[in-house]
Structure formats: C-alpha cells, structure tokens
C-alpha cells in the first residue's frame, strides 16, 4: 500500500526527486526537477545511491572502499547542488543511500511523504534510455508516484519552457 502524499497539506511542500548517478543524462533530470521545484514553490531532493556488492573484501579494504564511495557520492551531490544554487538560488536536499537503486528510491519515497514526483532522464544513445528508465518499464520497479522522464537532448531553454 502506498502512503498518502502530504505535499498538499498545510506546512508541507511538494518535493521533486532527481537521481544523481554517473550517466550523462542525469544532469537533464536535475535541470528539469530544479526548475519545476523553483517555479511551483516546491523542493528539490537529490538522491545518490551507492550500489552494494563493491565492498566484499577484507574488512580493512571494505572500510576504505565504502569511505571512497561515500566521498565520491558527496562530491557528485555537492557539484549538482552548487550548480542549482548558482543558477536558480534554491537549496536542494541531499540524500545518500546504499543499496539497489530502485529499492532505495522506493524506501525514500515511502519515508518522505512530501516527495510527489520522481524525475528521471532518458539517454539518447544507442545503449537505450538508461538503467533507471529501463527498470520502470518493468512492473517490479513501478513507483508509487508519477514519474517524469526528460529526454537527454533537451536544451536549458526547452526545459525552461516546459518546467
């Protein structure tokens, strides 16, 4: 069962969730989500998910690798947050999770009932739209909130006119 969204209740603001990852199209999702948040008086949430399975080593090595992954995640989030602050003057919420991306996105949506829209970007390359967009096509990853998929090839001007 899906928890009721609270974004329309008094004292709550609608949140737009964008996923930060290593794909080039992720920047387009942030551009769209941040403009929608600003234009509607909402909040931008940036989520970086550290995939599991990279840390199956000796304890000391595992600790170092986990710290490096967290530092990398923080650096990615900070870079996007800085750009959003400079271009739009809004302060995003930054979240780092460890696990399978689709599971962690689901958990965050369940925990934060102000998150009302998930914004993903579709890659324009031959490889397909990207792993997250591909996963939402399958029933197992269906999200309990609307998902907006932004084409990677949209310019800032086109995103401004749409958002």
Image (cartoon, rainbow, N blue to C red):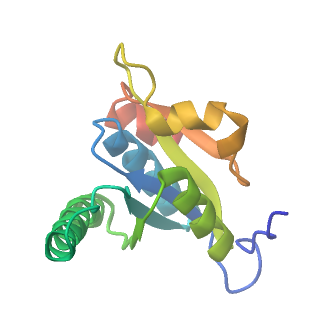
Residue occupying the point 42% across, 62% down = 47
Q: Is residue 161 above or below residue 89?
A: above
Rendered position, 154 above or below 13: above
- Please report the residue visible at 30 percent of the width from the left and 39 percent of the height from the top: 23
| Viewer-side residue, 4 vs 68 | 68
> Farthest residue toward the top?
126
| Residue 67 located left or right of residue 142 | left
| 3 over 84 or under it: above or below | below
Q: How many marks?
A: 0
Quarter holding residue 74? bottom left
The image quadrant of residue 124 is: top left
Residue that sits furthest to the bottom in the current view: 11
Compared across the picture, whether 76 is left or right of 98 comes to left
Between 125 and 84, the one nearer to me in the picture: 125
Residue 59 or residue 80, whichever sits in front: 59
Say whether residue 59 is left or right of residue 20. left
Name the spot of residue 9 as percent of width and height, x first. Answer: 77, 79
Q: Position of residue 40 (x, y in %)?
A: 58, 61
Residue 148 position, x and y percent, is: 59, 41
- Quarter of the figure that contains the N terminus: bottom right
Residue at the far right: name it. 1
**Left of 121 or right of it: where is 89?**
left
Q: Residue at x 69, y 42 (%)?
A: 140
């Amino acid at each position: 069962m899906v928890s009721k969204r609270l974004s329309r209740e008094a004292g709550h603001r609608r949140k737009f969730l964008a996923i930060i990852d290593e794909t080039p199209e992720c920047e387009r999702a942030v551009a769209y989500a941040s403009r929608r948040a600003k234009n509607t008086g909402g909040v931008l949430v940036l989520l970086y998910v550290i995939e599991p399975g990279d840390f199956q080593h000796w304890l000391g090595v595992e600790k170092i690798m986990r710290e490096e992954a967290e530092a990398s995640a923080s650096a990615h989030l900070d870079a996007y947050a800085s750009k959003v602050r400079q271009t739009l003057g809004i302060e995003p919420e930054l979240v780092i999770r460890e696990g399978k991306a689709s599971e962690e996105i689901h958990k965050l949506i369940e925990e934060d009932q102000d998150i009302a829209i998930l914004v993903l970007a579709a890659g324009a390359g031959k490889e397909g739209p990207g792993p997250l967009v591909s996963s939402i096509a399958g029933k197992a990853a269906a999200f309990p909130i609307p998902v907006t998929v932004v084409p990677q090839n949209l310019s800032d001007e086109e995103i401004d006119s749409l958002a």
